[in-house]
Amino acid sequence: MPVIHVVAAVVRNGERLLLCQRPEGKRHAGLWEFPGGKVLDGESFADAARREMIEELGVHARTVAGELGRFQDEGSEFLIHFLQVEIDGEPIAHEHQAIGWFLPEPAGRLALAPADRRFVDSLLGRDP
């Protein structure tokens, strides 16, 4: 199965993390995730994160830093790369059911998409 690279933006507001609830009709509908999406052919991970921030949340990525982790989406060809992203502006849910800012511990209690669950568990020092 070929690998499809996906970026997930880890956006912080102080200690809080920005999470988005997936829309109905999509894989993992109703589950929470870090915003992002598929990397297009010829696109860098940073450029994909910048594009996705505009498309999904209507904000500009001020900085896109290094990869904080990567996890395979079980049962699919998606390899999710979690990138540290700083944004300008207030995010608006253009594609998600809801968005919210969560401290890491409460974020760990949300119904998270599988790869996002493993990433949050790694942030909390749990075995992903």
Image (cartoon, rainbow, N blue to C red):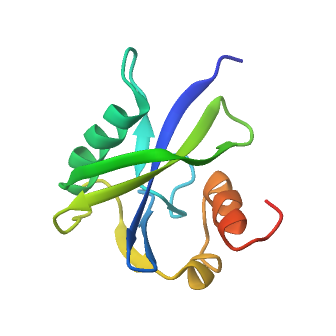
Closer to the camera in the image, 22 or 105 = 105
Closer to the camera in the image, 3 or 82 = 82
Question: Residue 53, position in %: x, y?
Answer: 28, 49
The residue at 71%/67% (across/down) is 121
> Is residue 120 visible in this depiction of the protein?
yes
> Is residue 25 visible in this depiction of the protein?
no
Question: In the drawing, does residue 56 fall left or right of residue 109?
Answer: left
Closer to the camera in the image, 49 or 56 = 49
Compared to 26, does 75 lie above or below?
A: above
* Total numbered circles: 0
Question: In the drawing, does residue 75 fall left or right of residue 123?
Answer: right
The residue at 61%/71% (across/down) is 111
Compared to 124, does 34 lie above or below?
A: above
Question: In the drawing, does residue 74 fall left or right of residue 24?
Answer: right
Question: Residue 72, position in %: x, y?
Answer: 69, 40
The quarter of the displayed image where residue 87 is located? bottom left
Q: Quadrant of the C terminus?
A: bottom right
The residue at 55%/63% (across/down) is 31
Question: Residue 115, position in %: x, y?
Answer: 65, 52
